[in-house]
Amino acid sequence: VTAKWKAGDTLPSFALPLTLRRAVQAVAGTRDYYEVHHDIEAAKASGTETVFFNTMFLQALANRAVTDWFGYDAFLRRCEVRMSAPNYLGRTLTVNGAIETIREDGGTMLDVVIQLATEEGDTTTILVTAQLPPAETPYRQYGG
Amino acid sequence: LILTEKQLNQIGKESPRRITSMAPNFASAMQWCEMVEDPNPIYTDESYARTTWLQGCFAPPTMLKTWDMSRSWPVAEREGPVADLGLENCPSIIAVAAVQEFFMPIRYGDTLSVTDQVSSISPEKTTRLGTGHFVTVLDIFRNQHDQVVGTHRFDLFVYGPARTDE
């Protein structure tokens, strides 16, 4: 089942523009009404440049990346988000990933490092562990 | 600023278990997928999801914390253990890191409950954002069968304007 991937593999990158529309979707979608995520003046007063995207949004993005890369039936086991710089409104987020290890631990586990960057450089590192379907489960292409 | 006895006593104290502010549901999951353009049909298409080893639709695992975001109406709900701490001159919060672990799928219609606790509070620190404390909060989520479905640990910086006195 892991023949498709090996440690060190680089995963296809993708981008997501951090528009105001998406900021609104993120506030509603994560139910996080803390001012710094929707009120530019409040964000500035808190010491940041402008509104920035919250942690739950980044967790959602990591979750999407995992099943985009490893199949819709890969199950996320662990997600560690480490913020080093804010993901500001108006930037474009680029998502890159690489497989760190593949191991057996009550199932086949992939440890993956996801790096998020904007035009200004790296903002966030996300360490995820995804569990692949058991070998005896035939993978079914969606719609197939 | 020195932590009070009351604040120190809250470290490691698990809150009573309560039902999350929202029950895991399909409509909220759709909003969640829309914001990051997650096309995974395992969250939406039962006939597909049933053919997989995960045996049916479930909510995106990372939604864990969202199910317990407090409501502001009709009653303003308790905001959480950080607000309870009442750290003086620290009106702002920023996340530094977050660790989620997932033990099983959360199904639409599950009844989720949660406990929270402050795991640690640092001495006063000054960063480029201001002066405050690093606070770690742990949420433990269980389903209606008393199974722990997931945990969420938040490392936060709780702060206010920089202080150089004392």
Image (cartoon, coloured by chain):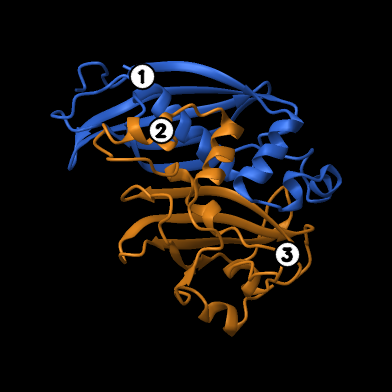
The amino acid type, in three-letter code, at marker 3 is Cys
User: Which residue of the protein is positioned furthest toward the front in this rendering?
Assistant: B47
Which sits earlier in the primary sequence, circle 3 or circle 2? 2
Above or below, comparing residue A14 to residue B75 in the picture: above
Above or below, comparing residue A126 to residue A121 in the picture: below
The amino acid type, in three-letter code, at marker 1 is Gly
The residue singled out by tag 1 in the image is A143
User: Which residue of the protein is positioned furthest toward the left in this rendering?
Assistant: A136
Of all chains, the one bearing label 3 is B
Residue B46, picture quadrant: top left
The amino acid type, in three-letter code, at marker 2 is Asp
Give percent across and percent down for residue A28: 67, 45
Count neighbours of disc 1 (C-alpha within 10 A) and say few if under 14, some if 14 to 19, many if 20 or more: few
Between marks 3 and 1 in the image, the one whose residue lies nearer the viewer: 1
Chain B image colour: orange
Of all chains, the one bearing label 2 is B
Give percent across and percent down for residue A1: 19, 22
**SS label for mark 2:** loop
Of all chains, the one bearing label 1 is A
Q: Is residue A3 left or right of B114 when viewed as pictured?
A: left
Give me the C-alpha separation between circle 3 and circle 2: 45 Å
User: What residue lies at 52% left-to-right and 61% top-to-bottom?
Assistant: B136
The residue singled out by tag 3 in the image is B90
Give me the C-alpha separation between circle 3 and circle 1: 52 Å
Residue B7, picture quadrant: bottom right
Residue B45's disc number: 2
Q: Which chain is blue?
A: A
Residue A72, picture quadrant: top left
